[in-house]
Image (cartoon, grey):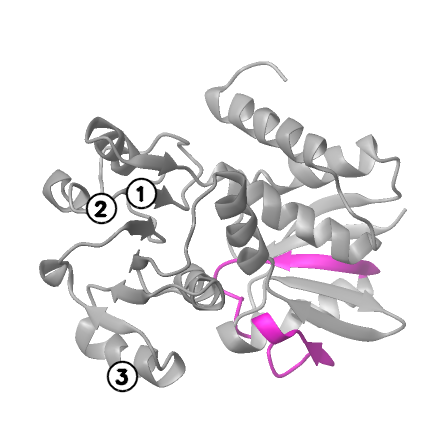
Amino acid sequence: MSKYGLVGKKLGHSLSPLIHNYVFQKLNLSGEYSLYEIENEKDILKKLRAEDVVGFNITIPYKEVLLEELDYISEEAKKIGAINLVRIEDGKTYGYNSDYFGFIKMLEEHSVEISKKSCYVLGSGGAAKSVIVALNDLGAKEIVVVTRDIESKKAELKRKFKNIIVVSYEDIIGGEILINTTPVGMYPNTLNSPVTEDILKRFDVAIDLIYNPADTEFLKLAKKNGLKCVNGVSMLVNQAIKSDEIWKGIKVDRALVEELEELVEKELRGEKL
């Protein structure tokens, strides 16, 4: 059976095995998806090759460490400067960024149009970089990155992404689409929101990449003020599906994506699967 998995330092209660193993079983594909907690970045490829793993996802804090070690890097991963998906075939390693594809699919699924829109991105980490590249490729009119570390992050971000604006939270003017890529509001600290209700009122659409809980404080406040709301479950599932498509050379249909999203929502609510 082909081995796949998720690599990170602390993986906790990841939903990745649930999603991938469900896909393998449903489509009758050879595959088993496991968690690989690795303490040292230098051991990643060596350890996974030794275990005959043929494909893996990468999470915090290793999304940028393999850029120089792989044989091939996809275009979107080069632009983002981070990899979260690796395929190993015939001894060669191929790196991609499935967050990029997952985010775009999520927007399509929820009919969120980016072209010619003013978009604010909360946060400046790896997820934010995937979102910035996707927004740029989709023709956003303006991309404003909001960070608490303006002094340390501004130069780095402007060097990497030429056409963005970088501001502090105090300088948010307002726009059309507001995207949270920070962990603020994630389980177990679910009572927090990265921005106030007053700031949310300045936007039309609120997107939260957090999927646990599916209904974050950020989205509750947005909903209360009439914004269109999108949670992170769709992105989680769609980036996982992109991984399976790349590993297996398949195309997963929309019905299975919807089935998986429902499965994840039930798991998050603690309902019987």
Residue 205 disc label: 1
Q: Nearer the viewer, residue 34 or 95?
A: 95
Q: Name the residue type under label 1.
A: Val
Q: Identify the magenta region.
A: 51-76
Nearest to viewer (mark 3 / mark 1): 1
Image quarter where the C terminus lies is top right
Residue 12 visible in the displayed image: no
**Residue tagged 2:** 203
Q: Tell me the crowding category of disc 2: few under 14, some 14 to 19, or many 20 or more residues within 10 angstroms, Cα based.
A: many
Residue 155 disc label: 3
Q: Name the residue type under label 3.
A: Ala
Residue at 22% across, 39% down: 192
> As drawn, is 198 to the left or to the right of 236?
left
Secondary structure category for the residue under label 1: strand
Residue at 58% across, 72% down: 77
Residue 208 colored in magenta in the image: no
